[in-house]
Amino acid sequence: MSQNRIERVTKAMQDAGLDALFVSNPKNVQYLAGFHATMPGEVQPMRDPEGMLVIEGGQVHLICDGRYIAGARQMSNVTAHLLESPSSPVTFAAAIRKVLGNEKGKKIGFESNALLYVDATGLLSEMSGATWTPAENLLAELRVIKTPEEIDNIRKAQAITGRCFDHVANSMRLGESERDVAVRIETFLRRESEGNSFAPIVAFGQTGCHPHYSPDPTRKLERGQMVLLDFGGIYHGYCGDMTRMLVMGKADERQREVYDRVLAAQQACLDAIKPGVTCHALDAKCRDYFAERDCADHFMHGTGHGVGLAVHEGPSIKRNFDMQVQAGMVFSVEPGLYYEDWGGVRIEDLVAATDDGYDNLTTTSKTLLELDY
């Protein structure tokens, strides 16, 4: 756990007039306390939680049940509290009172987007003497600016991701299925990193028209097909995320044209990155490039998203997002063009905004790879 993070969150709480902060999002629990949840998702049910935090007076209190208490008690700068099991909003209220004492008149921030409705209403009803206020933006704003150490972790996750691409590309075989390739990606990343930052996307030919897609066990790789690969490894909890394309054989005229358009649109966005530019202005760089070539209707998602402990976090590089880029933000730049009767192309890098531009954390070549079979 970084003491600097606790100092920053304590200052943010003071600015918001909060006496305490209840943290339930597992990624935020990890960010503040170093407690790594094993269950997926951003919402822990109170009937079976892994660990939640109470921040009060600059102190971090971790509430967990008997499955995790031994490890929690060994953590530095964290006070562990054993949660009565089976747990519920009632048992959580009792645990929070042990930290805060009488809650009457206290203002407590909570993550309204990281609690089940039944848990939130139960907890707020049980502790009605306190004033509860949504405070999820407080932590989101802290996490959006990465430290040099965080950026280095993402760079290393991206390097592992790049090695995985090389491994997979060198082992592609005609006749194998999309799922075969996805399993090979997952196996490599489980061996070489802390796992997959998301389920790999592997699309052969026409199925590349789906920006998000689940690899099919029956769709076989054929000569002449374009292949879209989108995946990421994890290093010290931080996610990688990269999309690259390859062709089984020589690229035809249309494959080359669409690829070159996407690559040029990405570069137009990259060239515009600097502190103060808005997220929607960066998105517009790609969208306008495509519009000038009458293909903007085939770009059907935002240009990018923040990456850190979660593979999707702030900032959002999309239309109507007015947040300004600041040095230390890490986000993807991933324009794409998708045609239902043909397939799709997406090229994705992760970049860290700097004081005078950006640092591309992705070193894997963007030359269209043509495999000679």
Image (cartoon, rainbow, N blue to C red):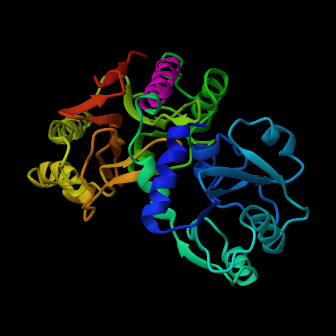
Is residue 252 in sight in this rendering?
Answer: no
**Horizontal relation, residue 96 to residue 6: left or right:** right
Taking the spot 51% from the left edge, 67% from the top edge, the residue there is 135
**Viewer-proximal residue, 36 or 351?**
36
Q: Is 166 covered by the magenta stretch?
A: yes
Magenta segment:
151-167
Which x, y percent locates residue 259?
25, 36
8 up-or-down from 350: above or below: below
**Viewer-proximal residue, 104 or 351?**
104
**Horizontal relation, residue 336 to residue 182: left or right:** left
Taking the spot 61% from the left edge, 75% from the top edge, the residue there is 106
Is residue 204 in sight in this rendering?
Answer: yes
Q: Is 210 covered by the magenta stretch?
A: no
Residue, far left: 292
Which x, y percent locates residue 144?
40, 48
Which x, y percent locates residue 70?
86, 40
